[in-house]
Amino acid sequence: RIVARHRSGQGYKKISAALKVSKSTVASIILKWKTFGTTRTLSRAGRLAKLSYRARRALVREVKKNPKITVAKLQRCSREMGESCRKSTITAALHQSGFYGRVARRKPLLSARHMKARMKDSKM
């Protein structure tokens, strides 16, 4: 209807008043029609996201609550929410949100023999 009114010579202001939509909506629809020749929603490039924004936020909440939670447990949580996905997908989603799995560096094993050897090396 917007395109038909535009083709008949009406301005954006009159079209928006008659159809009760904003001027920017009228302008964007007409621009789309001029560019692509249609007003339908066109397909986009790339694969759709497996996890929704809601599920991603829920995973982040779980990790903030318990930073030591395993990916397997997070996978079970996501399955309970109705969004089943692989562990690698969950890991990637957490990486995008700024959460990474870190393991602390292990301290060297210090037995009595090791301590003596270290003292000997430090005195030399």
Image (spheres, rainbow, N blue to C red):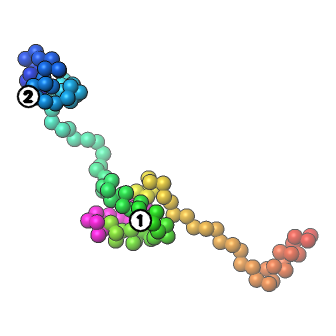
Residue 100 lies left or right of residue 73; in this view the side is right
Residue 55, image quadrant: bottom left
Q: Residue placed at 41% from the left, 60% from the top?
A: 60
User: Which quarter of the rendering shows the N terminus?
Assistant: top left
Q: Which residues are magenta?
A: 79-91
- Whether residue 62 appears in this view of the structure is yes
Provide the secondary structure element on which disc 1 rests. helix
Q: Residue placed at 43% from the left, 58% from the top?
A: 94
Q: Which residue is mark 2?
A: 1
Q: Which residue is mark 1?
A: 62
Label 2, residues with CA under 10 Å away: few <14, some 14-19, many ≥20:
few
Provide the secondary structure element on which disc 2 rests. loop
Along the line of sight, which residue is nearer the eye, 69 or 111? 69
Along the line of sight, which residue is nearer the eye, 22 or 39? 22
User: Which quarter of the rendering shows the C terminus?
Assistant: bottom right
Query: Up-down: is 56 above or below 9?
Result: below
Q: Residue furthest right?
A: 124
